[in-house]
Image (cartoon, rainbow, N blue to C red):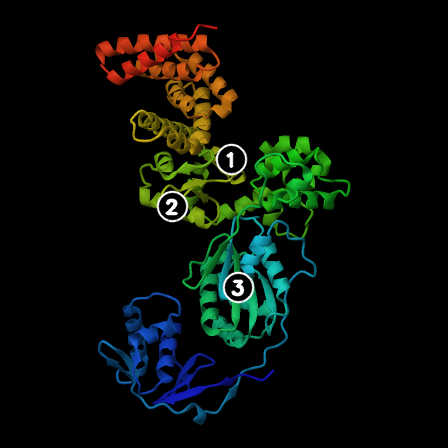
Amino acid sequence: MTPAAETILRFGDFELRTHERRLLRRGDPVELGARAFDVLQALTQQPGRLVGKRALMDLVWPGLVVQENNLAAQVSALRKVLGGDVIATIPGRGYRLAAPVAAPAEAAPVAAPVPPALRTNLPAELPALLGRDAELAELGAAIDRQRLVSVVGAGGIGKSLLTQHVLAARRGAYEHGVCWIELGGLEDPAALPGAVAAALAVHCGHGDALAALVSAVSALEMLLALDNAEHVLDGVAALCRALHDAAPGLRLVITSQAPLRQPNEHVLRIGPLAVPDAALPAADALRFGAIALFAERAHAVDRRFRLSDGNASAVIETCRALDGLPLAIELAAARAPLLGMPQLLASMRDRFSLLTRGRNRAAPERQRTLRAALEWSCELLASRERQMFRRLGVVAGSGSLALIRQVLVEPGLDVWSLLDALDTLVDRSLVAVSGDDDEPRYRLLETPRAHALECLDAAGERDTLQRRHALAVAVIFDAAYDEYFGGRVGVDDWLRRCEPDLDNARAALHWARDAGESVLALRIGATMLRALPPSLHVERMALADACEAAIAPELPQPLQLKAWLELSCVLADTQKGRARRAAERALALARSLDASQPDRFALYHALCRAASAARHKAW
C-alpha cells in the first residue's frame, strides 16, 4: 500500500495541513471548526481568485440546502483567527483569499501513518437471519450511498444481528475491513473515543482522546459499526460528526433505539417480523419471518419440535400476540417444547413472568428477559416521557392525536409538551405511527402496552386514566353519531373512519360496565351498534343484549331513545319481534320528548323505524 501524501499550504504565519485537517500558526495548532476549515481549504485551492457563494456552499455543505448566513458565519470565524485582511469579500458575489499561498510543490510531502492491522470483533459464527431479506438489501444499499447510517428500532427488534450480517458480508469490501464496537456497557460518553480506539486496536497516546482518535483513523477506509448507542446518543452524535468530517474513507453504521438527528444521517427504521393475518398451513406460514424464526429457535432447543399443520395456528397466534418482536419470539420459542403450543399461547397474558429465559447465555442482561428489555428502554426516558408512556397504556389498538390529547392533557402538561413527549416516544421506537399524514394514529404494541399498564398500576393511576379514556371515547363516539345523521359523510366512509377506534370503544365499554358507569357504557355501546360491521354478527348481538339490559328509566331519556333506535336497526334482520318492540319504545320516547324538547329529526327517525318494523310480523 502506498502511503497517502500530505499537502501543506503556507500563507503568512499560517500552515494548512489538508490531510490532517489542521491549521498551524508559527507551528502551534489553531482551533478551527470543521465547516470553517472546509471554507478555508476551498479558498486556498484558488488563491487570489473569486470563489462564488454558491460554489463555496456546495463544497462545504454538499447535498444540503443552507442559508447564506451560515457561510458568512464561517467566514467571520476564519477572520477572527486569520485577521481581517486575509479573506476579502466581493459584495454580492463571494470571497477570495488575499494572502499569497505557497504552491503545493513547495511543501514537503508528509507520509500518512500506515494503519495497523485491524480486527473485526464480529462473532466467529452468526445466528441465521430470518425474515430480513428486504432489510438486509436496504441496509447494504444505504451504506453504499451514505457515510452515516443509523439502524433504528425498538429493543429486541433485531438491529444488531441485521447489522452484523451486513458487516460479515463486507469484510473484504474495504481496504481496512470492518469493525464491530459494542457500546451497551459504556456509561460515560467521555469514554467513547477510548472505547473505539480500543476496539480498533489503534494507539491514541495521551491528551485529547477525540482528536487523537480522529488523527489515527483519518486515513482509514473501512466500515465501522457502533452498536446499542441509545443511552449515549449525544456523545455518539459528536463522535460521528468528528469522524465524518475528518475521515472521508470511513463509513459509519449506528444501531440505536433513536436516531442521532444529524444532518448527514440516513435513518433506516426496522419494524417487527411479518406475521400472517390468519391461520395458514405450515408450509405457507414458514414464508413469514416471525413463524420461521419461532420454528428455527424452538427446534434448536428441542430437535423434536417441528412446525406442522396441527400447531401452525397456535404458533401464528403466539407470534401475533408478541407483535412479531424477534426477542420475544426467541424467548417464547425456548418455552414451547416444555409447555406445548396450546399452553404457551394461553400464557401470553403472563408474558413477563413466562418469557424469562433464552438459550443465549452470552446475551447482555437487558436482552435476557422481556421485562429487562423494556425496562432498559424506559430508563432512558425523562420523567415526563415515562409518565406519558405508562398513561398511553389505556389506549387500546391505536389512538388519534385528538383522543390522546383528551386522555393525557392535564394541568401542568400543555399540548406542546405532550407533542414533544410523544415525538420522543416515536423516536425511541416505543410508539408506532400508522395511518396517513393527515390523520396519523399512535399505538403501543401489545408487549410495551402490557408493561405500560403494569407501570400505571404501580403509579396508582390506572383507574383515573381509564375513566378519562372512557370519557374521551364517549365524546368521540357522540360526535361520530351526530356526524352520521348530519349528511356530511357517506355511510361507507363513516364506517371506515370509526373502525380504527373500535378497540378503544371495546376497552372503554368494558371499563364502564365494571365501574358501574351506566351512562358512559350506553353512550359508547349505542354508537358501537351502528359502527360494528355486519360481519361481526356475534359481537353485535352480544352488544345488543347488553345495551337492552342496561336501559333503565333513570337514564337520560335522549340516551334511552338513541339506544332503542339502534336496537331496532341491529335486530331488524334476525329478531324482528324484538326489533319492532324496540322501535315502539323509541317512538313513545320520541313523542314524550317532543312535547317538552322538540326535536323534529328524532321524532322523524323514530317514526321511520316504527313504520319499518310494523311491516314485519313478530317472530
Question: What is the total number of numbered labels drawn onto the structure image?
Answer: 3
Which residue carries the number 3 mark?
A: 143
Q: Residue at x 61, y 66 (%)?
A: 170
Seen from this angle, which residue lies furthest bottom?
106
Whichever of callouts 3 and 2 sits on the residue coming sooner in the sequence is 3
Amino acid type of the residue tagged 3 in the rendering: Ile
Q: Residues within 10 Å of mark 2 (few under 14, many from 20)?
A: few
Task: Work out which residue is located at the far front of the displayed protein and give it.
Answer: 615
Q: Residue at x 52, y 60 (%)?
A: 254
Between 292 and 516, the one lying in front of the other is 292
Name the residue tied to disc 1.
454
- Which of labels 1 and 2 is toward the front? 2
Give the residue number, with chain letter if any, for mark 2: 437
Label 3 and label 1: CA atoms lie apart by: 40 Å
Hey, which quadrant is residue 24 in on the image? bottom left
**Relative to 462, is 367 on the left or the right?**
right
**Is 357 placed left or right of 100 in the picture?**
right
Res. 388 in view: yes
Q: Quadrant of residue 44?
A: bottom left
- Where disc 3 sits, the SS reads helix
Relative vertical location of residue 447 with respect to residue 505 in this rendering, above or below: below
Whichever of labels 3 and 1 marks the residue nearer the N terminus, that label is 3
Relative placement, left or right, of 384 versus 604 is right
- Asked whether disc 3 touches disc 1, contact meaning CB atoms under 8 Å apart, the reply is no
In this view, 382 is above or below 56 = above
Give percent across and percent down for residue 447. 54, 39
Q: Is residue 227 something that shows in the picture?
A: no
- In this rendering, is residue 23 above or below 617? below
Left/right of residue 273 with respect to residue 96 in the rendered view: right
